[in-house]
Amino acid sequence: MNVVQWQMAVVAALVAGGNALAAAPDLDYMARLMTAAAAAHAPYPDLVRINPALSEADLYAVQQRFVAAQVAGGASIAGYKGGLVPQAPIGGVLFAAGLRVLPKTVSRADFHSLLVEAEIAFEFCTPVSAQLADVAAVKAVVCRLRPAVELPDAAIPDLGAIKTDLPRLAQALIPTNIATRDVALGQPVEAAGIDLTALTVRTSRDDALLGERRAGPANAAMWEAVRWIVNDFVLKHGYRIDAGQIVMPGNLTGLHVGEAGHYRVDYGALGVVEFDVVD
């Protein structure tokens, strides 16, 4: 099924099921739509546009079903990610199959709408099953940091129109599992040896600077963002932190459209990740 056929099928399904959705949200049905869209590399349906009465709890319930379907199909959870932290914080699940250590190429054909986002992965060496009281508690269980370039599939309807409306964007992203796909990982570095406030991160394509996160005290907020993800997403939604899993608290240099070219993300003392995006 091509993208046009997929879109027509979704429209037909929504017309047929619209009244039922409005009366009593069928969360299983919505999750199936998400699963089908992901399999077809097609745009995700905008559930809140279909039914504006959907609550955040409803949207996360769809996400959990979407994630559970992938786990039932053989996927394994390798970590978690945050988005829009701290303004409109949301969380999602990372799968082991999407973690790629220093990939040489990324094919745009594998995505509907590829984005490139420079992030940092915080690796836990101690399982977490209880709330983390403060940043010190986070640092006590995180042993390594890794440069991590997220490669999400931002197949969100009207993304350009809603991307500055963070609460509305959060509603669109939650049921898609925050558009999670792949992550290009660099080599791990001992966390104790890295001062995030001294870290400058630069993202470039074909030697042209796309975005920069300069060193400064604001970088320390990443630790608090990791704490939010663990406490308010992972544990709150019945997941767990196992040793070896990672948490990614959000992008550092902006959201960049994954156009063809050579990408290089320089994390200073944390290392470099570079790869080619090909058509």
Image (cartoon, rainbow, N blue to C red):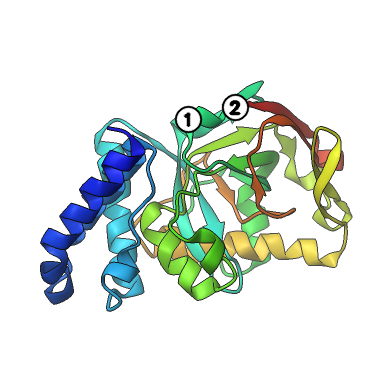
**Which residue is under mark 1?**
110
Q: Is residue 175 left or right of residue 116?
A: left
Of residues 23 and 6, the one drawn nearer to the viewer in this rendering: 6
Q: How many marks?
A: 2
Residue at 24% x, 37% y: name it: 72
Question: How dense is the environment of label 1, judged by Cα within 10 Å: few (below 14), some, or many (20 and up)?
Answer: few
Q: Residue furthest bottom?
A: 53
Snapshot quadrant of residue 274: top right
Of residues 274 and 224, the one drawn nearer to the viewer in this rendering: 274
Q: Secondary structure at mark 2?
A: strand
Snapshot quadrant of residue 251: bottom right
Q: Secondary structure at mark 1?
A: helix
Residue 3: give x, y in percent of width and height: 35, 39
Quarter of the picture containing the C terminus is: top right
Quarter of the picture containing the N terminus is: top left
Residue at 30% x, 49% y: name it: 34
Mark 2 and mark 1 in contact (Cβ < 8 Å)?
Answer: yes
Whether 64 is drawn above or below 101: the answer is: below
Residue 99: give x, y in percent of width and height: 53, 32
Of residues 204 and 50, the one drawn nearer to the viewer in this rendering: 50
Residue at 37% x, 42% y: name it: 42
Residue 71: give x, y in percent of width and height: 30, 38
Residue at 32% x, 34% y: name it: 2
Report the amino acid beneath label 2: Val
**Which residue is under mark 2?**
106
